[in-house]
Image (cartoon, rainbow, N blue to C red):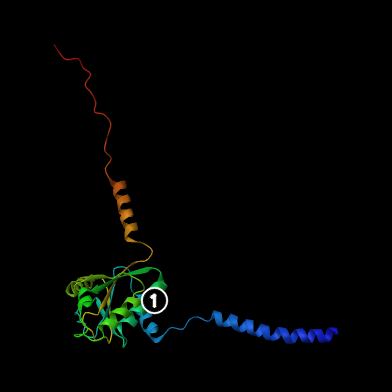
Amino acid sequence: MNPSALRSTLYLLLVPLWVVISSCSLSEKKPPVDSPLQTALRPELRKLGARNWIVISEAAFPIHSREGLDVIYIDSEIPELVDTVESLIEETHHLKPRVFLPAEISHIDYDYAPGVKAYRKDLQAAIHGKEPLELDHAALLEIIKNTSKSYRVLVIKSRTALPYSSVFMELGTGYWSADSESHLRNTIDRHNAPVVDKSPAPTDNKEPQP
């Protein structure tokens, strides 16, 4: 094969390969597109920090008339909302949620609330492997009431129509755990503790008077 023909053959082989590689590279660089749900929730979650709370609530959740309580409505079911909130929080790395559930939800019979079994199963998958803590619903409402006096509480109302199905999230610092804080406080307490003089008490060497 003459050199000219060889160059033509190589050109025909390499150009399609270059096009494929270039298209793959461009597709890899495209940022992921937010779903409508993520688009709605992301700006709200960016405002929150440690000691804030999120309530992903059932449709009939009562709203307190307090300045620290912000309410938005999203036409989705609770498990989908919980999954999205968990995913968005995990993206930030600076927050870590602790999940609370009303204790009553574990004891509701299907005959009185059709759909509750499927809800519990879907919710378990949505909380991303976390072990939720259970408290009476009234106690959780009291926590939200007291927290909203000093810190912001975001309530995301859903269309879920099941009793005691609301999910409560307490936000903590993702890069500083409770154990780290306890160790820090113990270190500070030891540093500030008064120094005890352990030297022996002076003795009186004078001879006793006759």
Q: Which amino acid lies under the numbered mark 1 shown in the image of this protein?
A: Ser
Query: Which quadrant would the N terminus be assigned to in this image?
Result: bottom right
Quick one: 41 or 179, which is closer to the camera? Answer: 179
Number of callouts: 1
Tell me if residue 101 can be seen. yes
Residue, x 39% and y 86% (percent of image)? 36
Residue, x 60% and y 84% (percent of image)? 23
Quick one: 13 or 146, which is closer to the camera? Answer: 13
Quick one: 118 or 43, which is closer to the camera? Answer: 118
Residue, x 19% and y 74% (percent of image)? 145
Position of residue 92 measured from the top left corner of the image (x, y, whole percent): 40, 72
Q: Pick out the residue farthest to the right.
A: 2
Tell me if residue 150 can be seen. no
Q: Pick out the residue farthest to the left.
A: 210
Query: Which quadrant would the C terminus be assigned to in this image?
Result: top left
Residue bearing the label numbered 1: 87
Quick one: 22 or 190, which is closer to the camera? Answer: 22
Position of residue 108 measured from the top left corner of the image (x, y, whole percent): 20, 80
The correct choice, above or below, for 10 with respect to 190 in the image is below
Residue, x 35% and y 68% (percent of image)? 96
| Drawn side of residue 7 relative to residue 171, left or right | right
Position of residue 197 measured from the top left corner of the image (x, y, whole percent): 27, 35
Q: Badge 1: how crowded within 10 Å, few (<14), some, or many (20+)?
A: some
Looking at the rendered structure, the secondary structure element under dot 1 is helix
| Drawn side of residue 3 relative to residue 116, left or right | right
Q: Which quadrant would residue 47 be assigned to in this image?
A: bottom left
